[in-house]
Amino acid sequence: MSLKAMVFIDGGWLYRNRVSLFAKLGEENFEIDYAKLPKLICEDVANGLDEDVSLVRTNYFGTIPSQRSGFNTSKQYAFYDFIEKSCGYDTEIHEVEVGSDENWIKMALASSLMFYAAQPGAFDVAILVGDDPDYAPALSRVRLFGKRVQIVGAHAPDGKSSMSLRGRRKVDDFPFLYIDDHAAEVRLVRELVKRVCKHCGNEEETTWAGPEFFCTACRGRYRS
Ligand SMILES: [Zn+2]
């Protein structure tokens, strides 16, 4: 029987630490393959344990500036929609005033972690993507339920060590994993493929992987 793993992603932490992925490959920026990320981490855990690990759910916690802030949040909403519909994440997104998001994410993630830990059979291994010492009390209590914990951190690109759960007692059960060790694998590679336009039926080469495809001409007509 395989172990059930549930992934908990601190979206704020992941956003800040994505630079460790870019730094690893010596790049400024690239797209991350969010569909692949939780699976890769589960594979790592499975290799370390020499047991099968099945991913039961990926819970993602993030924030978005409130309507009142005047920010254009359409891109962020599109991103959250994408990770939920195309990558299979369960998202919990909260509207916040600018600068107040940190605590909301941590409280929401820790609450969810405790909730699932208390459900018999929900998971065997909790994987936290978010190396933040504030999670220590929640992690130690999850382990009191007999669950095992894997923490995923990131190497600081500048070599400076930041506040970390590394080396803390009673917070985890496995050696630390580093997200940037997977930089090459989570870099999204967009392949050029031929697709049929939904509107006119013409074929065109594209890197667009979304569910519906419209050719250049039809997109141009739609815009004007
Ligand atoms: Zn077309």
Image (cartoon, rainbow, N blue to C red):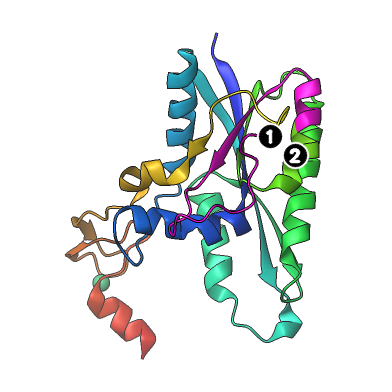
Considering only vertical position in the picture, is 77 above or below 112?
below
Seen from the viewer's position, the closer of residues 40 and 91 is: 40
Q: In the picture provided, is 86 more to the left or to the right than 169?
A: left
Badges 2 and 1: C-beta atoms under 8 Å apart? yes
Q: Is residue 106 left or right of residue 220?
A: right
Q: Is 106 one of the magenta-colored residues?
A: no
Which secondary structure is most common in the magenta stretch?
A: loop
- Residue 111 spot, x, y in % from top left: 81, 42
Tell me the quarter of the picture where residue 40 sits: top left
Q: CA distance from mark 2 to mark 1?
A: 8 Å
Disc assigned to residue 136: 2
In which quadrant is the C terminus drawn?
A: bottom left
Could one spot residue 210 in this view of the protein? no
Relative to the observer, which residue lies in front, 202 or 70? 70
The residue lying at 57 percent from left, 59 percent from top is 80
Q: Is mark 1 within 8 Å of ligand 1?
A: no
Q: Which residue is mark 1?
A: 168
Asked if residue 197 is positioned above or below residue 176 in the image, the reply reads below
What span is colored magenta in the figure?
140-168
